[in-house]
Image (cartoon, rainbow, N blue to C red):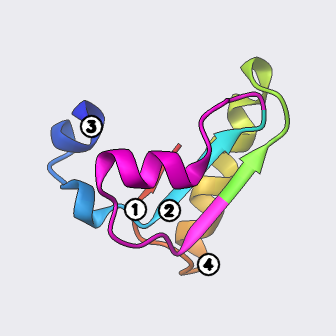
Amino acid sequence: MAAVAESGLSIEDVDGLVSYTIDPVEETELVRSVGIPEVRWSSRVPYGGGGSQGVILQAAAAVAAGAADVVVA
């Protein structure tokens, strides 16, 4: 929430999510808990840690392809 606010955006602007498979929080839980109104893109990158470049790449690809405008990774 703080990162979205610091970017000058609101949570309503977020329409994409990318996370690690090791993360125990499911997308539906995150969407409900922070109030994201609509998710147009969602993906998961295997594991975590060293996979950080995969999360950023998938978020950037979603925006470049027009699948989402604002992706939280």
Residue 45 on the magenta segment: no
In this rendering, the answer to whether 38 lies above or below 20 is below
Badge 2 vs badge 1, beta-carbon distance below 8 Å? yes
Which secondary structure lies at badge 3? loop
Instruction: Give, as a three-letter code, the residue at label 3.
Output: Met
**What residue is disc 1 on?**
70
Q: Position of residue 24 (x, y in %)?
A: 67, 30
Q: Give the mark, 2 or 1, whose residue is nearer the N terminus.
A: 2
User: Outermost residue, bottom direction?
Assistant: 66
Q: Give the mark, 4 or 3, whose residue is nearer the N terminus.
A: 3
For marks 4 and 3, give the one nearer the viewer: 3
Which secondary structure lies at badge 4? loop
Badge 2 vs badge 3, beta-carbon distance below 8 Å? no
Which secondary structure lies at badge 2? strand
Inter-mark Cα distance, 2 to 1: 6 Å
Inter-mark Cα distance, 3 to 1: 13 Å
Q: Give the mark, 4 or 2, whose residue is nearer the N terminus.
A: 2
Q: Residues within 10 Å of mark 2 (few under 14, many from 20)?
A: many
Disc number placed over residue 16 in the picture, else none: 2
**What residue is disc 4 on?**
65
Q: Residue at x 62, y 62 (%)?
A: 42
- Nearest the eye: 39 or 62: 39
Instruction: Give, as a three-letter code, the residue at label 4.
Output: Ala
* Residue range corresponding to the magenta coloring: 22-42
